[in-house]
Amino acid sequence: MTSLPTTLEGINHRIDRLDVTDYARTRNYLNGSVSRLSPYLSRGVVSLPYVMHRVLQRSTVQDAQKFIYELCWREYFQRVWFQHGDNIFSDFNQPQQPVLHKAMVCSVTKAVTGIEAIDREIKSLYATGYMHNHVRMYTASIVTNIADAHWKLPSQWMYYHLLDGDLASNSLSWQWVAGTFSSKKYYCNQENINTYCGTDQRGTFLDKPYEAITKMDCPQEVAEIFTPELHTPLPERQELTLNYNRPLLLYTSYNLDPQWRKSDDVNRVLMLEPSHFQKHPVSEKVLSFILALAKEIHGLQVFCGEIDELPEINRFPEIISKEHPAFRHYPGKKDEYEWMFKLVKQPKGFTGFWKDCEKQLTSLTPS
Ligand SMILES: Cc1cc2nc3c(=O)[nH]c(=O)nc-3n(C[C@H](O)[C@H](O)[C@H](O)COP(=O)(O)OP(=O)(O)OC[C@H]3O[C@@H](n4cnc5c(N)ncnc54)[C@H](O)[C@@H]3O)c2cc1C
């Protein structure tokens, strides 16, 4: 079980205790003041504008700028997903090169790479479902740029274990590291890991200057490979109690918003579609977290099945879900996705996107 808060009160407390100045100074360090809000943002419990405006109630735009900049990375990845759909699951801008195989690295999944900080944090990922951003980057870099694995399967392995698993942030970050969604690959070395993870390790396969790291062959520590079996242990299907005189609200593992149409007199059903989880498996821990969040939504029933298996779906006067690229096939009305910033033009790269957001952010500053 997870010890993370699942109530809105607990999540608000998490937002309110965030020190944005400290965040800006320390976020890259493993023991830095990061927010750990991603599980709630990914699962749609709270939206990006909700978090931004709540933070701005007690901080100036200037102080909160670094935090909002990071929130913008999520918004940017979502925008790319909305625009390009399933294309985010293939090499996006250019093919990954070189690629030795399309499997996963054994020593990474077993947390025995020999890099103390990485091994410790992979064990912690299994135990908690969370991994610090820097360690995600290090892990992805070791797998894709040192062991030369193609990014796709390893990204699925990481997604499987993350409570905050988000298909856009995950796929596109792996691609950013592997150089298929960016102009160059991301590399790390032992010195960088020591700096941000508080270790003092020497003599590892990453204990080299960057020049040597970018040119070295796959070290034996990360050479052994395998294909992980990722399977979502969905619960048994339960019978639903439905009132066909009332609308049907469809929730998903990406929309667990307890405030959504809260006062409406409706049927509320959380869809756990086997086809979705076959394509994008999640661990038992992740599923438990999703179900724990679902419990916070009054009257929400869980349905393990495909949308067209919902009993007599055509009888409802109205069907409503929230706009989302993974669930475009849902029938009925779609409530708009909640963005922080208006879209000025479709983003090509993050820098241009951030510039547009920054202009809008400045207009929020009281004169
Ligand atoms: C290889 C790799 C895989 C990733 N997979 C996921 C994933 O599946 N789901 C996911 O939510 N994030 C993913 N990220 C992005 C990032 O690591 C996490 O969002 C962040 O670490 C969450 O921790 P936090 O809430 O404490 O972040 P904070 O530093 O407190 O940031 C606040 C919020 O800003 C957003 N944010 C911060 N950094 C990023 C970033 N680099 N990219 C996108 N949004 C960001 C998140 O919504 C986060 O909750 C991945 C990054 C990498 C490098």
Image (cartoon, rainbow, N blue to C red):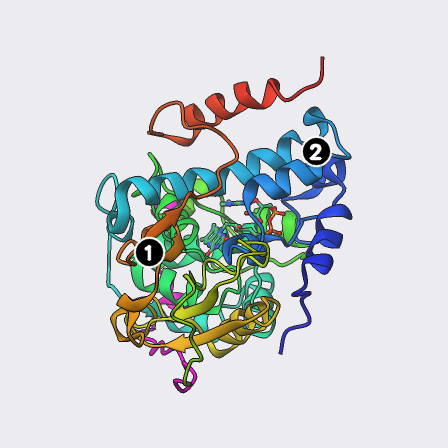
Q: How many marks?
A: 2
The answer to which of 51 and 156 lies nearer the viewer is 51
Tell me where residue 290 appears, x and y as whole percent.
Answer: 52, 69
The answer to which of 78 and 270 lies nearer the viewer is 270
Amino acid found under the numbered disc labelled 1: Ala
Identified at 31% across, 64% down, the residue is 153
Q: Kindly indicate the quadrant of the structure image that contains residue 362.
A: top right
Q: Kindly indicate the quadrant of the structure image that contains residue 20.
A: top right
Within the magenta stretch, is there residue 236? yes
Label the magenta part by its dominant secondary structure. loop
Circle 2 residue: 56
Image quadrant containing the C terminus: top right
Amino acid found under the numbered disc labelled 2: Leu
Identified at 43% across, 49% down, the residue is 169
Mark linked to residue 326: 1
For this orientation, the residue located farthest to the left is 95
Left or right of residue 82, residue 56 in this image: right
Tell me where residue 252 appears, x and y as whole percent.
Answer: 43, 63
Tell me the element at label 1: helix
Question: Magenta part of the protein: which range?
Answer: 214-238
